[in-house]
Image: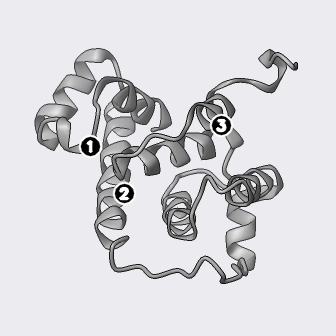
Amino acid sequence: MFDVLVYLYEHYWRPDAFPDAGLLARKLTAVGFESDEITDALTWLDGLSQVTLGADTLTVSDQSTRVYAAAEMDRLGEEAFGFLCFLETAGVLTPTRREMVLDRISASPTSPIALDDLKIIVLMVFWSTGQEPDALVLDELFTEPSERVFH
């Protein structure tokens, strides 16, 4: 599923730029994706679309404290939880975007979520709102720690 999401991110500027689900599924099949992956990705994207539309009505105070349920912590895992906290503390994720990310994590097929998959989810949340994270955040989302050059 995540490979399909990355493909869509790389080939379409915004979620509203790709064709209807039927045509998109045929294009993705022609590229070589399996039908199960395509179905899962399109279902996940539909959920992302619903969350993005509902984000306008979601009011989360910047001053609030988020307490994670045990099920959420199990779903996140230690590494992904640490990265999510890092993004929020760094000001990359607003509380509203954090909730969008958590919603999409709950809709992903893996538990706990892999760090690379979490990074894709974060990227897709930004993509769905028509915003792109700044260059340093993109570097954090895409570059492997072993490939970073330290100054």
The answer for how far apart the CA atoms under marks 2 and 1 are is 10 Å
The answer for how far apart the CA atoms under marks 2 and 3 are is 18 Å
Taking 100 as reference, is 86 left or right? right
Residue on which the image places disc 1: 15
In this rendering, is residue 68 above or below 53? below
Q: Which of marks 3 and 1 is nearer the N terminus?
A: 1
Taking 108 as reference, is 89 left or right? right
Q: Answer few, some or many: residues within 10 Å of disc 3's Cα (few below 14, many 20 plus, some between 14 and 19).
A: few
Numbered disc 1: secondary structure: helix
Q: What residue type is labelled 2?
A: Leu
Q: Residue at 18% across / 35% down in the picture? A: 18
Residue on which the image places disc 3: 116
Taking 64 as reference, is 17 left or right? left
Numbered disc 2: secondary structure: helix
Q: In which quarter of the image is residue 53?
A: bottom left
* In-front residue for pair 128/150: 150
Whether tag 2 and tag 3 are in contact, CB under 8 A, the answer is: no
Residue 89's x, y, as percent?
74, 60
Q: Which amino acid does label 3 sit on?
A: Asp
Q: Answer few, some or many: residues within 10 Å of disc 2's Cα (few below 14, many 20 plus, some between 14 and 19).
A: many
Q: Residue at 47% across / 29% down in the picture? A: 3
Residue 102's x, y, as percent?
57, 64
The answer for how far apart the CA atoms under marks 3 and 1 are is 21 Å
Q: Residue at 67% across / 70% down in the picture? A: 72
Residue on which the image places disc 2: 48
Residue 103's x, y, as percent?
50, 66
* In-front residue for pair 136/76: 136
Whether tag 3 and tag 1 are in contact, CB under 8 A, the answer is: no
* In-front residue for pair 67/47: 67
Whether tag 2 and tag 1 are in contact, CB under 8 A, the answer is: yes
